Amino acid sequence: MRSLTTNLVNTMTYVVSAILIIVFLAIDISIDNWVDAEFDSALTDKSNYLKTLVKVTPQGTEFDFSGEFMPEFGISTKASFFQLWQGSNVFERSESLRAFAGVDLLKKDIPVNSTFFADVVLPDGRDGRAMVSYFEPQVPKVNRSIMGKVEPMWLTIAITTEDLSQILVIIDSSLAIGLLLVIVLIRWAVVKVIHRGLTPLNDLNMSLKNVDVTQKHIPLSTDSERYLEIEPIRNELNKFVKISQQYLQTEKRITADIAHELKTPISELISLSEIYIRYPDDQRIGASYKQDVLSISLRMKTIVNNLLLLQQASSENISLHRQHININTLVNQVIEELAFKYSTIHSRLNINNQASDLSCIADEFSLHLILSNLFDNALYYSPPQSVIQIRLATDYQGLKISVENQLVTSINVNDLEKLTLPLFQAEQSRSNSDRHGLGLAIVENIAKVNGFEFGFELVPTDKIMFSLQIPIAVDS
């Protein structure tokens, strides 16, 4: 299992380390280039100074050099070297070259008044750097008119680079050690910062470990701080806990209601059986016993079938067979099926449709079940002689079916929101063993599975209207 904290720490460490390495490399290269440039500049200064010691007189070219002022060109273990040529002849050699009589310094053909730098091995075997200059000796003004052109000269200066290399090694080592220490410090700082930054998330995680559906809120932390990144998570978790609490309460209520609904017919069966067993010869009890048991059993079967239908309606695996359906034909079929329960159904239902050939593409079983429940619900929960308005219309969204009926007993807003809860009955005073409060719950679930829009609302002042919107084309 991967750790978010570890990923953040490693990522930030890698990124910062890469940036630091690039910066330190740039610094190291800049320092190396600067040191090399300063070294070459020192060589240039020494070369220019030696050039000023070359003097041209009518008697010839002279080199006025004194080892007292430049002891580095003398005999020592860390001596530097120089050599002068005029034409092809050696003009002057530093005292340090006396021990290397057969060795000449670097000489290179280059343009007049130009220089050339190169890394070389000094006569004594040390690593060094040489500067070659090809120049014209300076002729004093007083002698320029009587002297001809002076032959150019070569000057080569060679200085050891061992001390410079040691300095560069020290600088590189210092930068490497500094880089390593900075990376370690950055790693430590990143760990501290990330752990501190993730404290609210850790607090939320700890609170989640102790949460249960009876809690109304999940505390973010022990303090009152709120964070923009954490609050949306906390709010969504609170919604989830609230929904879970509602589902738990609904499950408890449904379980209790199912037990209550089944308890009554079971008690009736037990009572009838006990009486029949106790008085087996009583003709009055025996004559109605079979019919009573059958009636009670059918009631229990209705409850169980409706519960199974509710469960099937809420399942996404329900099989749908969409086909072309004529709505007027289906409405008339439902009305005829309900006529045995309501003898006045034809006079009470007022159907208002825009055309005689309204149709849609839907699952016939689902649509038949929805209309049967809505019509039956409207007929049962309205005054016996009241008229029920059924409207069939089409618009750009599809087909809309609405059922409006008058209420015997008014419904408050709280009860209106609970109408589609399983086994909920708003009119508790009107008890009937055939009504179980499952019809609207089945309708809502069936509509949702089919992609229909189902809704209901109170219309002034004592009426309720159920509406069903069927899209023009429902995806299979």
Image (cartoon, helix red, strand yellow):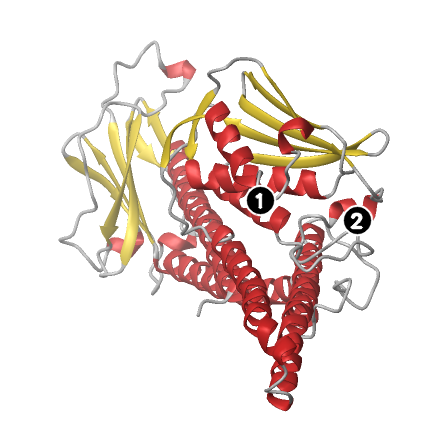
Q: Quadrant of the N terminus?
A: bottom left
The residue under label 2 is 415
Question: Is 402 or 102 nearer to us in this picture?
Answer: 402
- Check the image and name the residue furthest to the top: 145
Kind of residue indicated by mark 1: Val
Q: Residue at x 42, y 36 (%)?
A: 364
- Numbered marks: total: 2
Vertical order, 78 against 149 (above or below)? below
Tell me residue 8's x, y (percent).
52, 59
Q: Residue at x 23, y 56 (%)?
A: 98
Tell me residue 374's x, y (percent).
62, 39
Label located before the other in sequence (1 or 2): 2
* Mark 1 surroundings within 10 Å by alpha-carbon count, few (fewer than 14), some (14 through 19), many (20 or more): many
Residue 51: name its quadrant: top left
Q: Is residue 256 left or right of residue 157?
A: right
Tell me residue 332's x, y (percent).
51, 29
Q: Quadrant of the C terminus?
A: top left
As helix, strand or loop, the secondary structure at mark 1 comes to: helix
Vertical order, 135 against 308 (above or below)? above
Question: Is 187 or 136 nearer to us in this picture?
Answer: 187
Residues at marks 1 and 2 touching, judged by CB atoms closer than 8 Å: no
Kind of residue indicated by mark 2: Asp
The residue under label 1 is 443
As helix, strand or loop, the secondary structure at mark 2 comes to: helix
